[in-house]
Image (tube, rainbow, N blue to C red):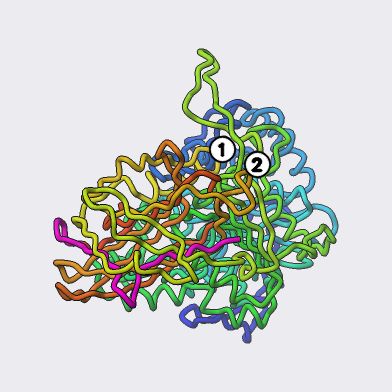
Amino acid sequence: MRLATVRNADSHQSSREERVHVPQENPFTTGSSEHFPGFQDVTAGLTAAETSRITGRGLWAADGTVDPGAVRLGQTLANALLGATADGADGADGADSLLPAELAAFVQEVRGLALPSYHRIEGAAPDVRLSAFSLRQLAPGPHPLVVVPAGWTPFGWPLFLWSYLVLAHKGYHVLAYTPRGLGIPGLPSTSSGFVDVAGPHDWADGSAVIDFAEDHFDTSAIGFMGESYGSGISQLVAAHDERVAAVVALSTWGNLATSLYDNNTRHLAAVKALLALTGGTVETKFDEDNQRILADFQADRNLDGVVAWGRLRAPESYLDLTNDKGTPTFFSNTWHESLFAVNQTLETFNGLDVPKRLNLWIGDHAAPEGPALIGPPATPGEVNLPMAEAYAWLDHHLKGERNGVEDWPQVCNQVMFTYVTEPVLDPVTGEPTGENRIVTPALRETSPGWSEVTRGIEVLGLTGDGAGGADGRLLPAVGGAPGAEETGWRRAFLAGVDTEATAMDAIMKTGQAEWAGNPKIYDTRKIDRRHAVAWTTEPLVSPEGEEAAGRRVRGIPRLRLTVRSTATSASLYAHLLDVAEDDTARIISHEPLNVYGLIPDQDTTVTWRLQAAAYDIASGHRLMLVVDSKDPLYGDASVTWTQTVIGSPEGDPSFLELPLG
């Protein structure tokens, strides 16, 4: 007997008041509820060396798309698990022929614990079928269930199949699904319908998946775990459905509106990258309303409508619902996140009044947890801490394990780039390859909450010297306020031309290299001072002596500048760099700001926050602030070859606030 849910997908909250009994035969007694046709392109098995290389590379290819090796690994695991079970035969031969011996043995161990199955679950609308995969525990229950909405890729649930095996091995039922509309036509992992971009239809689909699970699994508790798109959906389903007992949100967002558009600046590269990962064209993947919003965003029009659309899809908008339910929520994000910048996640985290944890890591979107979602460790025995702690959160809140989670501080920050590395040598020539490997992990610091991360503020005044392309100075403000030397000046640059001061070389890929021990190195001498202005401190030395860090940056920097332009709009893209003795640098933080409504020959003062950071500037290094007007990540407001003038008037000085720990 099935207890079905009647809901209105057009409402903001799923209605579960009217429930009707619908007789339904339980398909799980014989395996999958749908025939699994397999991934036909998977014809050759994987070797141990190939598997190790795939997980060692991580999730992203050089162009910011999903690494083909990661796709192959996930689809091969799916074929090995489901290829024989669809007709009821033993799956051992499939695993042994497709997978390296150690991985095949683990798959067979999990198959002894849990039954793999393939489904197409009816979503919130009758014409929507969600491609899904499950692992049902064979031992008598009840058992906790983890639901995993797939990330925003055209490959759906198979991409993270390794993580489902890990969860099943730990004693969980697992039900993973591809959100509506995502996927390449013809693949068995593709779901029907239009992509709703984590809108109300996706929340209702999540509740439909829970209905399906309650009909067919003997569950003791239900949690959601998601990566990227799946993490946002997980938060939103949990906010609207009281049956969700815990959430793990990896590389997540709190406010989709400010992720896409903040400080009057459109995050164009992020949207372009996402649109390339749906599995089809905008016209075939989105309904007319969402097509219109995406077109407006890209055309720089109706931005109020875009913001309202994003807020509807923001977990931050439903904090009252989450707090009322008390849903334990785990966030894991990165400092140099290119899709969902860290500050908006912090604001949502700070608004949660539930058991919560925030881990912040070196790198960019999915770089820390990605390898452990797609496959076993590249180095046997290696532990991926981001995923180990995510699993621990579920173990505590769904199983009731006393595993130390109950004593965790709310915040744990990894400090950029405090790892120790060594050169990677070419196995044939023995010469350095130019890449590094981490031999000692980066430092991590805990805090009772985000507000305790910053213990003080250093105010740095900006000087006006720097004629002829030289840099101005960043001077500590005596008494907390800039003095006479830091006011009464103007400095100009030609706008609309990019410089070497860019946030990253490639979306997601640059941060993936950071995570692996290879942060982007800037040559500050190559930053064209015709198209940028820069200010630099003296070599920094800690009051505690040369052995300590010159500055311990902890928190959210804030910048105030006075600007005028020969155009009516200007872009001010701020970058904070850690500059070594040889003038090479690594990025600490950045943030764009577009300014509109400027009047020639009139000053406008602007203040904005850069992205949060935990960064140790080595003793003897300098802090550099660079402001230019263009970056490939963003839609700018500059008019090429117009003049932008930065100033610091008396009584309204320009300054940089540096948060210190």
Q: Position of residue 321 (x, y in %)?
A: 61, 81
Q: Is residue 45 left or right of residue 269?
A: right
Amino acid, disc 1: Leu
Nearer the observer, 568 or 97: 568
Q: Position of residue 396 (x, y in %)?
A: 78, 62
Q: Which residue is mark 2?
A: 441
SS of the residue under disc 2 = loop
Quadrant assignment, res 173: bottom right
Q: Would you call the spot at circle 2 few (<14 residues within 10 Å), some (14-19), or many (20 or more)?
A: few
Please tell me whether residue 81 is drawn above or below residue 193 in the rendered image.
above
Q: Nearer the viewer, mark 1 or mark 2?
A: 2
Q: Is residue 658 magenta?
A: yes
Q: Position of residue 632 (x, y in %)?
A: 31, 52
Q: CA distance from mark 1 to mark 2?
A: 27 Å
Please tell me whether residue 594 is drawn above or below residue 163 in the rendered image.
below
Q: Is residue 657 left or right of residue 333?
A: left
What residue is shown at x 74% (from left), y 38% (from top)?
A: 108
Quadrant assignment, res 571: bottom left
Q: Which residue is mark 1?
A: 73
What residue is shown at x 36% (from left), y 51% (from top)?
A: 276
Q: Is residue 483 magenta?
A: no
* Extent of the magenta region: 639-661
**Residue 183 seen in the figure:** yes
